[in-house]
Image (tube, helix red, strand yellow):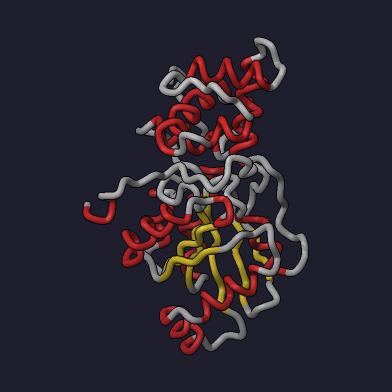
Amino acid sequence: MTQQIQWFPGHMAKTIREIGEQMKLVDFSLEIVDARAPQTTQNPQIMEMIAVKPVFLVLNKIDLADPHQVTKFINKNKDKFSGILTTDAKMGVLSKDFLRQLKNNSVFADLSKNNTAANLKALVVGTPNVGKSTFINHLAGKNIARTANKPGVTHFLYWIRTRYNLVFLDTPGLLWPKFEDQEIATKIGILGGIKDNLLASDDLALWLISFLQKNYPTAIATRYKISHFPLNNPIAALMSITSQLGLRQDFESASQRLINDFRSGKFGLISLDFYGDDYLDN
């Protein structure tokens, strides 16, 4: 990985200041993360601010993640939050399943019992492109929050009333000023949390190929029907993929195709936060 990845536009810094000011108005927070990388897509800077109220972690896009890795993450981190909930914001029917999980949570039950207002107010935060606005729209029952399959669409904080006696304070997708670990930045880039035009797609593709070869060794060959797939050589693998796609030596287009296929789940159930079998013992 040769590229140093950083992306922290001005509206993110402004939003962080505003969140601190708004915390006194909310009853709890929902932090939306990508279930394929639930540790990577948590914002450590935001967590410090919102932890003054109950925080529920929402693993979104659960239908795209490796269930084995999701279970390991939940077991390791369940005591760090008021609850860990799961959903797929693209399927509206799962909104009811999310609400069932929320209402069955003892912390949320206490909040509901002690709340004298008609509605509970929740701050909704997440890194870019984790599906936060789509999630909100399903619970609101209409398209209120702006959505797009790219980061940086929402720029302001605003209140949204849902159909379920919940009021959400929607926020822009937020990163942090500097990535100390470039692997975290790379994963966020692969998941679509950083604008593609700021990234070297071939760098991301080579990292993804290396990761898949190690942890899901049949995923790429199966997807692209490559019978003699070079293992342990990401560059040779990218050349094979490019050839198989009929792109000649257009490695950039092949790289973007690989990344887009991963984002849409065409390799199967894959997690980028991948914990070894000893993870629960650490």
Outermost residue toward the right in this view: 142
Image quadrant of residue 193? Answer: top right
Question: Residue 106 location in percent, x, y?
Answer: 42, 82
Q: Residue furthest front?
A: 227
Which residue lies at the image location 60% right of the left edge and 25% below the top edge? 226
x and y, in percent, of residue 208 in the image:
49, 30
Q: Identify which residue is drawn at 40% across, 30% down.
A: 182
Q: Is residue 161 visible?
A: yes
Decide: is 203 above or below 174. above
Task: Count the marks.
Answer: 0
Q: Residue furthest left?
A: 282
Q: Residue 257 in the image: x percent, y percent?
A: 66, 28
Q: In the rendered image, which quarter contains the N terminus?
A: top left
151 in relation to 259, above or below? below
Residue 18 shows up from this direction: no
Above or below — where is 167 with respect to 72? below
Report the residue at 52% width, 32% height from top. 7
Q: Nearer the viewer, residue 239 or 104?
A: 239
Extreme residue toward the top, this view: 249
Q: Which is more toward the observer, 190 or 45?
A: 190
Which residue appears at 46% of the width and 62% of the height?
Answer: 57
